[in-house]
């Protein structure tokens, strides 16, 4: 059973920063792409950022503010979120996809107060 363990969500003021973390098993981490999505109640899931073999990709709405990175030694992917805005308020989900299948984390809530 593959698990994605997320942490780092919380409440922050506009302009603040948070760092999300997502840890998984080494067999998945070394093969699959890793990424973050977000979804608010009643809305569709939205792509945020992804990293695969060192290449990164971002949604236009977060470019220049969010940074995705990975620590291969810890089998962990991070999402550094800076200059947060109220519209970034969402539940953020870690995901992995590729030859070893597709898996999702349980989600971590981010709330940005105005």
Image (cartoon, helix red, strand yellow):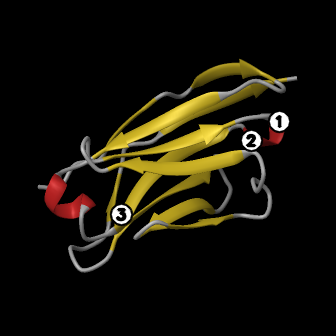
Give the mark, 3 or 1, whose residue is nearer the N terminus.
Answer: 1
**C-alpha distance separating marks 2 and 3:** 21 Å
Is 30 placed above or below 85 here? below
Place residue 81 in its image quadrant.
Answer: top right
The residue drawn where x is 71% and y is 37% is 89
Q: Find disc 3 in the rendering and name its residue.
A: 96
Decide if residue 83 is on the left or right side of residue 75. right
Q: Secondary structure at mark 2?
A: helix
Q: How many marks?
A: 3
Decide if residue 42 is on the left or right side of residue 112. left
User: Which residue of the protein is positioned furthest toward the left in this rendering?
Assistant: 1
Using the image, tell me which numbered label, if any, was put on residue 88. Answer: 2
Q: Residues within 10 Å of mark 1 (few under 14, many from 20)?
A: many
Residue 56 coordinates in the image, percent (x, y): 56, 66
Do the numbered discs 1 and 2 sit on residues whose CB atoms are within 8 Å?
yes
**C-alpha distance separating marks 1 and 2:** 5 Å
């Amino acid at each position: 059973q593959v698990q994605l363990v997320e942490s780092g969500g919380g409440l922050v003021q506009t302009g603040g920063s948070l760092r999300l973390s997502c840890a998984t098993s080494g067999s998945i981490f070394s093969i699959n792409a890793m990424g973050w999505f977000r979804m608010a109640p009643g809305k569709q899931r939205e792509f945020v950022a992804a990293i695969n073999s060192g290449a990164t990709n971002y949604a236009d709405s977060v470019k220049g503010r969010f940074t995705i990175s990975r620590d291969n030694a810890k089998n962990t992917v991070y999402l550094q979120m800076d200059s947060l805005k109220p519209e970034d308020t969402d539940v953020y989900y870690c995901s992995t996809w590729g030859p070893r299948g597709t898996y999702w984390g349980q989600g971590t809530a981010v709330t940005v107060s105005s």
